[in-house]
Structure formats: structure tokens, C-alpha cells
Image (cartoon, grey):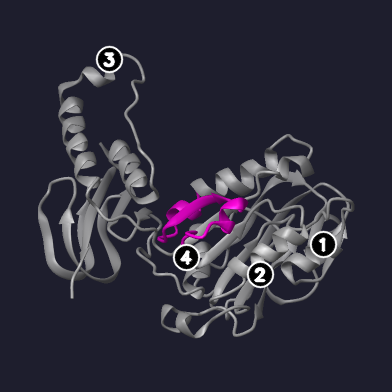
Amino acid sequence: AAITWRNLATGFTRGFNSYWMEFGGGWLRNDDIQNLIHRQAEVIKESLEWEHETAPGIAMIIDDTCALETNGDGSFLNEAVMSEWKMGLSRCGVPRNIYLFGDLTLDNFPKHRVFYFPNLFRLTEEKMAILREKVFRDGVVVVWGPGSGISDGDTIGVESAEKLTGFSFEMIGVNTPRRFLAVNSAHPVMRGLPEDTIVGSPLSYGPALLPTDGVILADSWTKGGHRHAGMVIREYGKGAAGNNRDIAARGAGDYASVFITAVPLPANLWRNIARYAGAHIYSETNDVIMADKSVVALHSAWSGRKTISLPGSYRVRDVITGTLISKKTSRVTFDLDAPETRIFRLEKTQ
């Protein structure tokens, strides 16, 4: 029940159809499972009448041409895309969605507060024009993966990376493991993180781009024992919104750029980045959150008292049981008996 309700909630909030799978051994022939599926089928029919709209959160933007700029083994992409999505991003308490780079050109591309580019290795003038128009604005935070902009199509080097991200770099032309240690506890992006916040893995890849300017948020452990910055931030225009109240005061050219030398980031760091961009934080715990403008769900393997903060006042109904939770509230608190998924239908009140 926890898994299938979680899968359905993901479909409700991200715009696709989930389904049930037979894993062998007659799993679907169990009477309890059939009763569960019957209720879930009812909810799927109900969901057709719900108003669905993407909640402003974190957008992972994948460049589907990136394989042409790599050796093709996919190891880095597993770390920067798959592990990032399943680990920190899914548990940061903020809605998130995956898009292709070309989706940015759509007139109806949803508003988001954080843009993460894990594999934008090759920079072209066309891509840069799209970024200036659609991304570098409104007080968002843009997070660049370790190899961002390392190629202009002809040359591997720092020039195109500097043009894309806005940072200066030193390049070390080797494959090397990456890790960085959070050090700047005074900056809002790093505030409240544990002292042992270390990001990275033993995976070796390269060339290594190491930023040489910007505000240092973390120190990098790199080949040769040299001290380099591992995570840096730079503000442009009026910078990041800082909170959702100041988003309206931001416009074209107002954003913050963050470069990271290692992946994947932990949930609490993604949460801080999203908060700094003015995103609404639905949960301060590292449970799995799924949300759009009319549905919010929490999935967890940890029992206990859970709280979901809503981005306004809503009439809230429990989707699974059909019971009314509140006629008007901005917070949903409940006891969760793990593993369990809870789904709530939100209707805006005056």
C-alpha cells in the first residue's frame, strides 16, 4: 500500500499515469491487494476532475545530447542524475520535476525556483540565449554540475565553462574522485547543516573544473592535496530572492549561480538552496514529498509525528480515506505508521 500509493501520488503531482505490476507468485490475487487496487482505481477516476498545476520548486534540466560529449560509460550520469534524484532531491521537502533542455523553449514551461543542470557539458550560443531569457531571472538559484560548460564543441577548457556559469576556473586534466566539505556556516545556503556535511563519492571522472572565485561555501578535496573551492555562489543583479516575499522584486538578470565540484547533494542542502531561492518548503524532515497546486503527499519509512506546511490556506481532504481533515488550514499534522504514504487533496479557501 505504501509503495503503490506513493507511485500514484507521484503520477498525480507530476502528470503521468502510474500502474500496478505483477512481480510473480500471484501477488495481485491477494484479496487485500485487490481491495487496495479497487480504492486506488476510484481515486484515479476522481483525480481526472482535479485541477493540476506544477508547484514552483526544483527543475532538473537534462541535456539529452550530453552523451556525445562523454566516453559513454554513463557512470557520472548515474551519480549526477539518478543518485541525485533518488537521494537528496526526493527528500528535500520541495516539489521537483525533470525536463529536457529543449523544454525550456516551451511557452507554457512551468515556473520554478531552482534550476539544476547536471550534464550541460557543451555550451552553444543558442543554449546561452535560452538561459538568459528563461532561467537567469526572477531571483532563482541555478545549480551547475561538475562539468558544466566544459566544451564549446571544438575545445575542452575553462573558457566556455566561465561564460556559462560566471565563475573563473582552473582545470586539471585528469580523472579524479570528488568530495567537498561544507565550511561557510554563515551563508543561508549552508546554515544549519551538520558539521560533517561531506558531498561526493569514490567515482573518478574528469577533467576537473575547480572554481577560483565566488563566495566559497565548501572546500574541495582534490588530486595532489591542493586546497580548492568545492562549492561557490555568486549573485547577479539583485541576486536570489532569499524568501518568497521578495520574488516579486526580482526580474530579468536577477539570480544566483552555484557551482558544485561533486555530487550528489544531501536533502538538507537542497532544501537550503530552495529556501534561498524563495521556494515553499513543504517539509523540514527528510521524508519523500510530492506536491502540485492541488495535491500533496508524504511517503516515509520512519514512523512518527509528521507535519506538512502548505503554501496558503486550504480545505484539506484525505485522498485515501476520503475524510475531511480541515475546512481551512495551512498545516497538516498527522501520525505516520511506517512504511506508509499519506495523500491530501487541497482546495484553496478565501
Q: Which mark is residue 111?
A: 4
User: Nearer the N terminus, badge 2 or badge 1?
Assistant: 2
Q: Nearer the viewer, mark 3 or mark 4?
A: 4
Q: Which mark is residue 296?
A: none
Residue tagged by mark 1? Answer: 160
Disc 2/disc 1 C-alpha distance (Å):
15 Å
Q: Are marks 3 and 4 in contact (CB under 8 Å)?
A: no
Res. 193 in view: no
Quadrant where the N terminus sits is: top left
Q: Amino acid at mark 1?
A: Ser
Disc 1/disc 3 C-alpha distance (Å):
56 Å
230 up-or-down from 37: above or below:
below
Q: Nearer the viewer, residue 320 or 261?
A: 320
Residue tagged by mark 3? Answer: 26
Q: Which residues are magenta?
A: 87-110
Badge 2 density bin: few <14, some 14–19, many ≥20, Cα 10 Å:
few
Q: Amino acid at mark 3?
A: Gly
User: Nearer the N terminus, badge 1 or badge 3?
Assistant: 3
Residue tagged by mark 2? Answer: 132
At 33% from the left and 20% from the top, the residue drawn is 22
Q: Are marks 1 and 3 in contact (CB under 8 Å)?
A: no
Q: Are marks 1 and 4 in contact (CB under 8 Å)?
A: no
Left or right: where 284 falls relative to 43: right
Q: Nearer the viewer, residue 129 or 271?
A: 129
Disc 2/disc 3 C-alpha distance (Å):
54 Å
Q: Secondary structure at mark 2?
A: helix
Left or right: where 87 falls relative to 332: right
In terms of image quadrants, where is residue 171?
bottom right
